[in-house]
Image (spheres, rainbow, N blue to C red):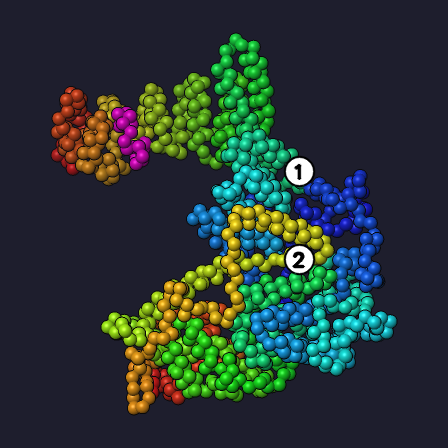
Amino acid sequence: MSDFDEELTKLALAEDGKRETSVFSNPGMHFPWLQERIETVVTGGKKKRDFAQTTSACLSFIQEALLKHQWQQAAEYMHSYLQTLEDSDTYKRQNAPEVIWKLGSEILFYHPKSNVETFNNFADRMKNIGVLNYLKISLQHALYLIHHGKLEDANRNLSDAETWRYGEKSSSQEVLINLVQAYKGLLQYHTWSKKKTELSEIDKDDYAYTSETGNSGNQSCRTSTSICALLKTPGVWDPFVKSYVEMLEFCEDRDGAREILTNYAYDEKFPSNPNAHIYLYEFLKREKAPRAKLISVLKILHEIVPSHPLMLEFHTLLRKSDTEEHQKLGLSVLFEFLDFAGCTKNITAWKYLAKCLKQTLMEGHLVWVEEEWMSRRSWWPTFHFSFFWAKSDWKADADLACEKAFVVGILLGKGCRYFRYIVKQDHETLKKKIKRMKKCVKKYSIVNPGVCT
Amino acid sequence: MDLEEAKSFTERCSQCAAVSWGLTDEGKYYCTSCHNVTDRSEEVVSTAVITNTKINSISRGLRKRSKHEKGWDWYVCEGFQCILYHQAEALKTLGVGAELKNEVLHNLWKRYLQKSKQAYCKNPVRTRGRKAKVLGDNLQSSDCASELELLSDTTLESGAEFQSDPQIPKPFPLVKASPKSEAADVCSGSVDGVEYSEWKEKGVLKMTVPRTLALCYLSLLWQRETITLSDLLRFVEEDRIPYVNAFQLFPEEMKVYGRDKGIFAVESWPDYEDIYKNMIEVAIFLDLPRFPDVTEDCYLHPNILCMKYLLELNLPEEMHSLTCQVVKMTGIGEVDFLTFDPIAKKKRTVKYDVQAVAVIVVVLKLLFLLDDKLEWSYSSLAEAYNEEHREDEPQFDFRKWYQVMKKTFDEKRQKWEEARAKYSWKTKRPIYRSHIDKSVMYKRREMVEHLQKQFSALVGSTPVAEKKDPSSFQFNWTEGDTGSPCFHGHSLQGLLRTKGQSLITKNSLYWLSTQKFCKSYCKHVTTYEESNFSLSYQFILSIFSFLLRIKTSILHEEVSLIEKKLFEKKYNESKKRSRPKKVRRH
């Protein structure tokens, strides 16, 4: 049996090289269960070594301790778990450093007796076990240092990682290098922005001001090279984009900034990201871009996040537009916005809807309203316009209640309980408004009187 | 930089584990794939380093081997002998008589070497083909009395070698290493490790680390010592007897690497069934005669073991008369049944500890039926009685006992699992498979030690609880301060009634644990499907088997076997009638 064992390990050793690349460099698929299945086939259903059994038990004890924030216990188990670095199972041994790094850094981050020095020590050790984890650990180490305010150390760490070289680059490592560089860029941005705020306090005519602005120009150039590479790789890079654009705008490089943002928002290789469109919209707004352009950006955002606060801005933009299509869209933007539970108390939205409904009906587009109402007829009455809401809305915000009452009056008719409750209320300042509302509802309500709930 | 020159350096890079070296201008090696520069410079012929003349003379003619590791030449069987020596020493410190080591185990080992034709015979298998050389050398260096030379003598001098300290195995006369072992990846620290691992001969039982334990148990059994197999395995798990990584007890100069790993490295604790099986195999292979009789005054006799486990399980002592009765009725107390006789036709022996515990299970079933109903109604009766008669000796209350045992065993099991999870398997002496792995293994070891140091600093100065003295008892219920009540003195009054002159159990029902015994060659007696049984039965099996650190199914099998004997007549009848599961007891 021991011979058989040895044969297997030899086989495993021979495949070491192959496996290393196939497991780690291929970003596509990894099936842990498959590995397990293969292992049981290879061992012929032989009993698992107690080593494997106890270390996996140890792992679950560590996880449990972490979950319960028992850092001391976790460290105790960690002491034993470190032996997985010497596992005779090649596959497990190769995965051990990453697991140990993740658990260990978590423990050291929270453990009361731990400090920056112990963490540094640990990170430096772990970086040099195997090649594959060097960049990942360096990056996380830098983040830890940033978290603890050691920006210079973090910067040095990132520089080290950036210049670190090894034999063959795998594609996953390339992204990591870009990330390392980008974080370095972010640190540079931080110093730059600190300087900027300092400068804003200095007199503009001062000699120091002009020389400093020159310097910061240099800085942004350096930053651009470190962040740029990352922005070419698909991904969500919000903080990098934001700071980079800020620096570009400061240097008056509007075209560059626009290119970055457009690419970030429209490149199909990038994952769908609402923030990309928000950044672009805000940039275009600052640039005073034509309305049509702003509308086209927000249209995409509307498709991704119909409940975004910017939708109200979108609505006003659409109302200002002349085309019928935009007018219609403006109405449905409001309806969709109010579909979300988080937006139900947004008084502006209700105000806009009230106004918009009135105007649309005045213009004779009853069909548009009915179209929107069709799908909501079954659930909006209980979602927005229940008697309970009438009471609580009135209590919390009478203005909101009035706007809602107007809307419900138009949509459900004056017989509905929400409307009746609000109208019945006697309020001095709102008296006139309610009266006006009653008149309007009578005039425009889409419901024939008598069919209401 | 010259890549050609660097080919002789075949260790793995400590950074990226590649073997691709170049030479820097300073003559140092650097890795061509990750540019890591080692602190090793090109190796100067290593013989110059050897200053110890003694070692120098030993490694004469073995320069190739000594280049990697400078140590003694030793044989695999010497390694096992060393392990056995330490195991015997450990047993001695546990209180076993000295004869075990000096006489019994020693003789068993000699017999093993003889039977496996490794020594003590005319033509030892390990030296076949190179015998002439051995003899020739023997003549020249007759002053160095080698261990194996002595062993190749056929006289069985008792004790002589075992008392001589095997910590210093003397160098074996030079033998040319087989050409195979020259290959870079097939190597071993022992002289014959490669051959041994490839040695396959019909009828020969190769020694393994689990089998050393089987030998130990055989000698304990021969001596009728007060250690059962489950005790022995528990002591191994508590690290009181060397087993896991026993090779670390080898003297520094006995280098262990390469194929030795497959022979000596163990990454599992011994398993009861496995060692039991090995023990019988070894006994048959050694052709041992009938063992000394296990009589009623022996520790291994069920009556005594039952008493021991009744105490351990916090059950009333009164139950002992019932266990004795069951033992008597089933005939498992007979000398012929209990004594191990490897030559006899039926090659089996008794699992003394499991059997004793199984008898207790049977008695509990007789008393309480364990059908999840009767035991609880009896408990209520006992509770009421105890309430009314506070002054008297209390009656045994199953419910109360259950609560106490559940709590205690859950805690114990939790602690046991935690201790296992913290067990450290790796030693200060890492075993590498081939020379190119050596530096990486040592580097890794160093790394682990450093990291461990770091984490132990975080653990703080809470001293690890002092290791308790070894004991065959795991629980002590009589100590008042444990907080758990002791049931030893409780009476079974409420459970028995008089009939004529004898006492019989109030409960007259019984259910058999199984009616189907495997008849095929799978060697299972029966299977244990937990969900088919009452919760009380499951609970009792689970805590009892935890006490012995065995699988519940083994205990269930043993219970079934005892029931088969106890109800032999009924069992046969019920097979004919096929249906009724409950049997009336007399």
Residue lying at 19% horizontally and 37% vertically, measured from the top left: A388
Q: Closer to the camera, A76 or A207?
A: A76
Query: What amino acid is labelled 1 in the image?
Result: Arg
State yes or no: residue A343 in magenta. Answer: yes
> The disc numbered 2 marks a residue on which chain?
B
Q: Closer to the camera, B252 or A170?
A: B252
The label number, if any, that marks residue A165 in the structure image: 1
Q: Which residues are magenta?
A: A336-353
SS category of the residue bearing label 2: loop
> The disc numbered 1 marks a residue on which chain?
A
User: Can residue B14 be spotted in the picture?
Assistant: yes
Q: Estimate the x, y position of residue A199 in percent, counting from the top left.
A: 51, 16
Q: CA distance from mark 2 to mark 1?
A: 33 Å
Residue lying at 60% horizontally and 34% vertically, measured from the top left: A157
Residue lying at 32% horizontally and 85% vertically, measured from the top left: B504
Q: Estimate the x, y position of residue A404 in percent, counting from the top left.
A: 22, 29
Spot the residue most to the bottom.
B500
Q: Identify the image quadrant of residue B559.
A: bottom left
Please tell me if label 2 and label 1 are on a single chain. no
Query: What amino acid is labelled 2 in the image?
Result: Arg
Q: Which residue is mark 2?
A: B429
